[in-house]
Amino acid sequence: MTKGLFASLNVYHDIASRSATVNMAIDEALLETAEIPTIRFYTWDHPALSFGYFGKFADVKNHAPRRDLARRWTGGGTVFHGDDLTYSIVIPASETAFGESSMSIYENVHRALCRVLLEQGQDAVVAAVADRGAGVSAAGHSGECFANPVRADVLSNGRKVAGAAQRRTRRGLLQQGSIQGIDLANKFADQFARELCSKCCRKTLDEHLIARAHEIAEEKYGTQVWLRKR
């Protein structure tokens, strides 16, 4: 993949603050339905904590009084949400980029992110540390994500400021990412999207996708069975 990772990209600025479970469900609904690559930027209606698919509920349950908890479908560790810029990228299986390795996609997305940060005068580098797999697999570690930088995470002045986790299915690849602990310019999200693809099309979430997301939230992410899966 080159600087332009995709031939075209649908961009969703989801300005409606949503619950943790609905946010997770919308990302899955996009994976179900997207026909071209998408990126969604979103916020949270309450302080939240998401943790990876293989994470243990016992490790995060003490945060429940202060934060909404959600188990992600993707891997990785625990991530605190509320003051971060959260995004998800969906790459349909029909796309050429889907054939790239998970690490290649992870690294190229973060290289694009770094270029935007550098253009805005921030210190940013893609980490070159031993690959422990936490960022790119459905497994990963269950510790605090931003305290444990891994290969291809984004560092600024020695601190991790961006990480992500992935899930690959027959339909495509979902990458959920968070950027935090660094000042972002007002146009950062748009510039990030354009760095991923020069042909961006701004979209809004339609009522059918939102309805499907609420079904997924009710059947999966909002259940105690899913939350306490491990």
Image (spheres, helix red, strand yellow):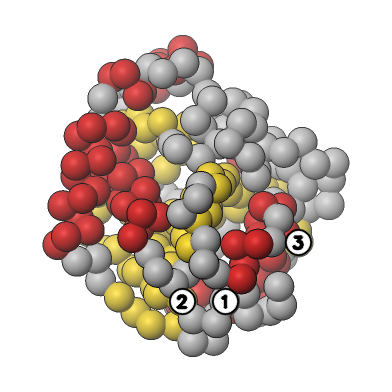
Query: Cα distance, mark 3 to mark 2?
Result: 24 Å
Nearest-to-viewer mark from 3 and 2 = 2
* In the depicted structure, whether residue 90 falls above or below residue 143: below
x, y (%) of residue 120? 61, 76
Q: Are marks 1 and 3 in contact (CB under 8 Å)?
A: no
- The residue indicated by pointer 1 is 6
Query: Cα distance, mark 2 to mark 1?
Result: 7 Å
Q: Secondary structure at mark 1?
A: loop
Please tell me the numbered disc located at residue 9: 2
x, y (%) of residue 36? 44, 72
- Residue name at image x 48 percent, y 63 percent: 92
Q: Are marks 3 and 2 in contact (CB under 8 Å)?
A: no
Closer to the chain start, of discs 3 and 2, is 2
Q: Are marks 2 and 1 in contact (CB under 8 Å)?
A: yes
Disc 2 crowd rating (10 Å Cα; few below 14, some 14-19, many 20+) is many
- The residue indicated by pointer 3 is 125
Amino acid under disc 2: Leu
